[in-house]
Image (cartoon, helix red, strand yellow):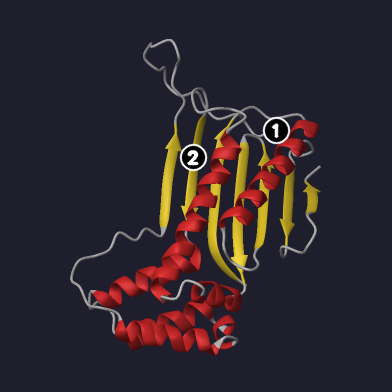
Amino acid sequence: MIDIGSTDFLINVPSLPRKEFKFYSTNLFDEWEKSVEQTLTLADSSISLEIEEGSIKGAGKIAVALGTLYFGIGNYGDFISGLETIRKQVSYVSNALFKSAMSPFGCSNVDAKVRRNGGTLSHLHRLFDKVQRGVLTPDEAMIEVQMLLGEEGESVPEFIRELRLQFENAPRHPKQLSLIDEEWEECVGEPTDGKKRSPRTPSPKPIPLYQHYRIEIWRESKKDKKHVRVTGL
C-alpha cells in the first residue's frame, strides 16, 4: 500500500465528554468515508482516522495498492491527466475531512490548523516537473521513484515501465509548475461584535492521563468493516 494523501488538524476546543467525543469521531469517519467513496474513482482504498482528545487533534490517511492506482490512472487514457485527476480528487476529500471536523464548532469562534500532504501523488508530480524543467534526467527521476516505491514498485513492473516512458516523453518547459506537496492553513476565530480581537488565549492544558484518550477508526478496503479502537483510558 502507498500513501496518496493525509490530513492533520488541530482544533482548539475544550475537551468533550467521552460519549460525545466518541460520537464526534465515529460520525466524522462515516462522513469522510462517504466523501471518499463518492469522489475517489479508484476501485479500492484503505482509510484511517485517528482523533486524540484534549483539544481535538486528528489525522486522516488514504492508502491504495500500487496496482489499483495504476489501473485507476489508466481509466483516464492519458497517464499524466489521470494522475492529476486523482490528485485533485484526493485534495477534495482532504478538504472535506477538515470541513466536517470543524462543522460542529464553526470557524467564527474557534482557532484551528490543518496540514494536507499529497503523499506519493504529489511526489510523482514534483518529479515530472523537475524532468520537464531539465532539473532531473529521466534516469535520475527513476532512481527517486525506486526509492519512493520500494518493494511496492517491484510488484507492479508495468507501472514502473509506464513511468519511465512518461518521463522520457514528457514535453520540456523552463517554467515551474504550481505543484504543492504540503499545504498549511490556519482558521482563526474572530469576534462577532466587530471589536478588535483580543490576544489568543493559551491552548487548554492537557487533561490527566487517565482521562486522555484516543480513538482510531479504519477500514482496510471498501469491503472491510469499520474497526474502532479506543486507547488511553
Pointer 1 residue: 207
Q: Horizontal and vertical percent for residue 195?
A: 38, 11
Amino acid type, mark 2: Lys
Residue at the (67%, 56%) spot, across then down? 48
Q: Dot 2: few (<14), some (14–19), or many (≥20) neighbours within 10 Å?
A: some
Q: Horizontal and vertical percent for residue 79?
A: 42, 76
Label 2 – label 1 distance at C-alpha: 21 Å
Mark 2 vs mark 1: which is more N-terminal? 2
Q: Which picture quadrant has residue 177?
A: bottom left
Q: Dot 1: few (<14), some (14–19), or many (≥20) neighbours within 10 Å?
A: few
Residues marked 2 and 1 touching at CB (< 8 Å): no
189 sits left or right of 67 in the view: left
Q: Which picture quadrant has residue 18?
A: top right
Residue at the (75%, 39%) spot, across then down? 209
Q: Secondary structure at mark 1?
A: loop
In this view, 124 is above or below 109: below
Amino acid type, mark 1: Ile
Residue at the (59%, 81%) spot, across then down? 152
In this view, 230 is above or below 165: above
Q: Which picture quadrant has residue 101?
A: top right
Q: Horizontal and vertical percent for residue 183?
A: 41, 51
Q: Quadrant of the N terminus?
A: bottom right
- Count the marks: 2
Name the residue nearer the viewer: 54 or 149.
Answer: 149
Q: Quadrant of the C terminus?
A: top right
Viewer-nearest of discs 2 and 1 = 2
128 sits left or right of 123 in the view: left
Residue at the (79%, 51%) spot, across then down? 228
Q: Horizontal and vertical percent for residue 201?
A: 50, 23
Pointer 2 residue: 113
Q: Secondary structure at mark 2?
A: strand
